[in-house]
Image (spheres, rainbow, N blue to C red):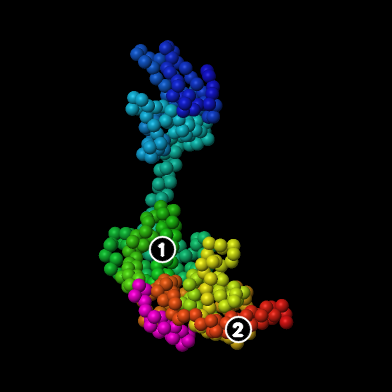
Amino acid sequence: MARRLLTEEFIDSLEPPEKGEIWIADTRIRGFGVRLWASGHSGGKAYCVRTTDTNGRSVRKTYAPWDGAFGTWFMRSLNLGDVRVNENGAFPLSAFLKDAREWAEVEIARLKGRLPSLEEQKQLDEERQRVRDEGRARIEALSLRSLVEEVLDPNRSHGWSEAYRDRLRHAFNQFDPTDEIRSRCIRELLDDASSNDKIPPSISSGNFRLLKSFFNAMDTYSFGIGGPHVGRILLSRLKYNEQRREKAKDFVDELEIEDVERLLKALPGLDVDWRAARCIEACFQFRAPVSRVMGGRWSEIVDGYWVPYSPAERKNWHFYLERIDQQAFECLKAARQNALDEGVQSMFWFPNKENPEVPINNIDRAWNKLLSVVGWPRVSLSNAAKTYKQRYSFLEWPDPEKNEVIRKEILTWNSVLMYKKRGG
């Protein structure tokens, strides 16, 4: 018996013997090899397993390329064009080498007792299916309310904080404000498609994202114990208001100067923290993204210009050199005065209320409140500010004298700030 590493080139080079049988063992997998034999008119070759079972009996098995699940890899490779054919237009035995090795590993492990036998595996599958059927019956008998509470149980929610679970509950309450759906059992929801009409047609984009995450988590929990894809069914019934999205897009495309002026005039009377209000105003004064404006620092202002990107961010910093005109100056001046009135000394334009050493990280609540006051559709601050700045990038011609006054005053701010931070 010969032993060597089986390769595709070696398999292609093998020819059946004139008589008898030859066995060539693979050095990579013990017990696996290729068998060559002679027959009346020609011969053949095939991958085989030769080993002993747990009782010490010799076992021989021949690999059948198209049987079972082991043909999956080969068929996938065939579809992708990775498998070649020989000069006769047939698939050579070498094309199945990788697949045959995987088959041999499983068969040898079963014969050696390292894996369940086919009969044992069948029994395990039947037991597993019985448990899943019981789980499915239990899930289908639950009401949607009970399933929601099971998923939101702190012992099952995989690290969700109490605040996040409360947000998910609130989003689900918006999804089912009349309790008509959650009081029904899961089996009814699966069978009755008429409940589609009971879903509210308008859900905010924030709640929509929360519900998608929640329904996916519900799916994972339900299917993990054999239940149906409840979350997927609910998600398919979630009617996010596409008309409102189109309306918001059309509104942004037609944004006028007067619209933004009316929006900014409503900011002082808005019952929100000054940080969020000033930040929203600044987003319409600078071209940088909203996240950069929120994290703006006084030290980034140099000679009357704001440089929001560091030299390490070379692909952006030269483009986003922004002149601080009169409107942006008034906005920053008001933000500085608001901070001084509170006794806050921070390197950021809009410091976090709880920790002035970091900037604010969310202004969505103030922005949505402002939209409601002025009657705008639910548009994103980023899209509105970006469109406005692209369309009206030069509302006034720079005045050198004004720019010099602005530069000197901001320089004074930075000097005072650095002096106080040093303990002066």
Looking at numbered disc 2 in the image, what kind of residue is underneath it?
Glu
> Circle 1: is it few (<14), some (14-19), or many (20+) Cα within 10 Å?
some
Q: Name the residue rendered at 42%, 31% in the picture.
A: 96
Q: Position of residue 334 (x, y in %)?
A: 55, 85
Residue neighbourhood size for the residue with mark 2, other residues' Cα within 10 Å, grouped as few (<14), some (14–19), many (≥20): some
Examine the image and state in which quarter residue 419 appears.
Answer: bottom right
Among the two numbered marks 1 and 2 on one chain, the one whose residue lies closer to the N terminus: 1
From the viewer's side, name the closer residue of 259 and 340. Answer: 259
Q: Position of residue 243 (x, y in %)?
A: 31, 70
Q: Which residue is mark 1?
A: 212
In depth, the one of 330 and 405 nearer the eye is 405
Residue 302 in the image: above or below residue 110 = below
Q: Are marks 1 and 2 in contact (CB under 8 Å)?
A: no
- Say whether residue 110 is visible: no
Quadrant of the image containing the C terminus? bottom right
Find numbered disc 1 in the image and state the secondary structure of the residue it sits on. helix
The reply to whether the magenta stretch includes residue 267 is: yes
Expressed as whole percent of the image width and height from the top left, the position of residue 124 reads 44, 42
Q: Is residue 96 above or below residue 371?
A: above
Magenta stretch contains residue 287: no
- In the depicted view, which residue is nearer to us: 364 or 122? 364
What residue is rendered at 62% in x and 74% in y?
299
Distance in Å between CA atoms under marks 1 and 2: 49 Å
